[in-house]
Amino acid sequence: MAKVTEYQGKIKPDWCPGCGDYGVLNGLQRALAELDIAPHNVLIVSGIGCSSNLPGFIHAYGFHGLHGRSLPVATGAKFGNPELTVIATGGDGDGYGIGVGHFVHTCRRNVDFTYIVMDNQVYGLTTGQASPTAEKDMRTKSTPEGVIETALNPIALALTCGATYVARGFSGDNLHLAELVRNAIAHKGFALVDVFSPCVTYNKHNTYPWFRERVYKLEEEGHDPSNFQQAMEKAFEWGNRIPVGLFYQVERPTYEGEESALRHGPLAKQPLRQEDLASIVLDFA
Ligand SMILES: Cc1ncc(C[n+]2csc(CCOP(=O)(O)OP(=O)(O)O)c2C)c(N)n1
Ligand code: SF4
Ligand SMILES: [Mg+2]
């Protein structure tokens, strides 16, 4: 096992003191150390948001992209070099709002990478507007009279769209989160780890004590993660008791495993088949 400190970036996180994202960063570093994956074999891709700043704070390759666009970049990187451990990180606004179309299609494609969503139910970076996972009636800067819409359910959505590893963690329980992330990375296929990651500055409703009173571990109550129907039922449990842990896991061929262009190895290591680039340029002249 590598040391967790090997994955410490040079730049200290500038998140607010107490932000849940510290726990997620630590959980990810711990998972990588336990799996002993060298930093130069890891690529972390993100969109925009407080949570999406994470690649800047970890010692690994990083790509800080556009708001909501981390998943297509991660997909391209994995196709380019399937030997890389690719991890996308971001927020609920980034992934379930502007990026939700990419989320749906990445789930059904089953590309082999892990997606960690730091779900704080608000847009933290832009100072606390309601996000797609904000609870109905929640008052925020953008919803002074309370959220009107029904909250999006990331677990049910991922299950419906075909994700092959679907889990939820809590940044207040670091060891449990690290275990979920470790198993997500080890899983062959698209893995979602939605994480309750409290925004201590703008979400005064879904706080650490609020979650601590409610969360319980699926594995402690005999949940069978191979049972899709049971996973769906658990996905809708919300209120006084909220489940965390592994909802569902199944094996299915990955997109890159079925793609004929990748049968000869990673694109990054294949010779260029079209060497006469001048003729291509002339085609467009
Ligand atoms: C195309 C585009 N639209 C809007 C924004 C403004 N914007 C930046 S971050 C963000 C939301 C971030 O929320 P979330 O993904 O939940 O991350 P958090 O800050 O809560 O971690 C928005 C709307 C942007 N940068 N680009
Ligand atoms: S505003 Fe919220 S999400 Fe952003 S760093 Fe501060 S506590 Fe974290
Ligand atoms: Mg957010």
Image (cartoon, helix red, strand yellow):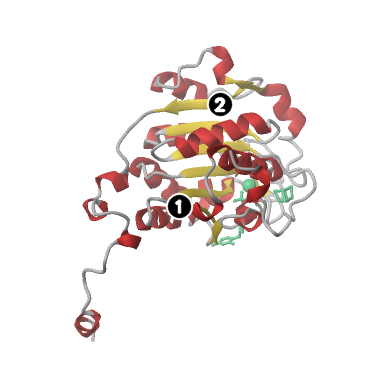
The location of residue 157, given as percent across then percent down, is 45, 36
Q: Name the image quarter holding the N terminus.
A: top right
Residue type marked 2:
Gly
Dot 1, crowdedness within 10 Å: few (<14), some or many (≥20)?
A: many
**For the view shown, which residue lies furthest in the front direction?**
1
Which of the pair 252/147 is nearer the observer? 252
Quick check: marks 1 and 2 in contact, CB under 8 Å? no
- Residue appearing at x 39%, y 44% in the figure: 112
Screen quadrant of the C terminus = bottom left
Query: In the drawing, does residue 59 fall left or right of residue 188?
Result: right
Report x, y in % for residue 156. 46, 31
Tell me which label, 1 or 2, sits earlier in the chain. Answer: 1
**164 in relation to 243, above or below:** below
- Image mark count: 2
Q: Is residue 138 above or below residue 142?
A: above
Residue 61: image location, x then y, percent: 54, 58
Mark 2 crowd level (few <14, some 14–19, many ≥20, 10 Å Cα): many
Q: Which mark is residue 245?
A: 2
Q: Amino acid at mark 1?
A: Leu
Residue drawn at (34%, 31%), measured in percent from left and top?
251
> What residue would you read off at disc 1?
71
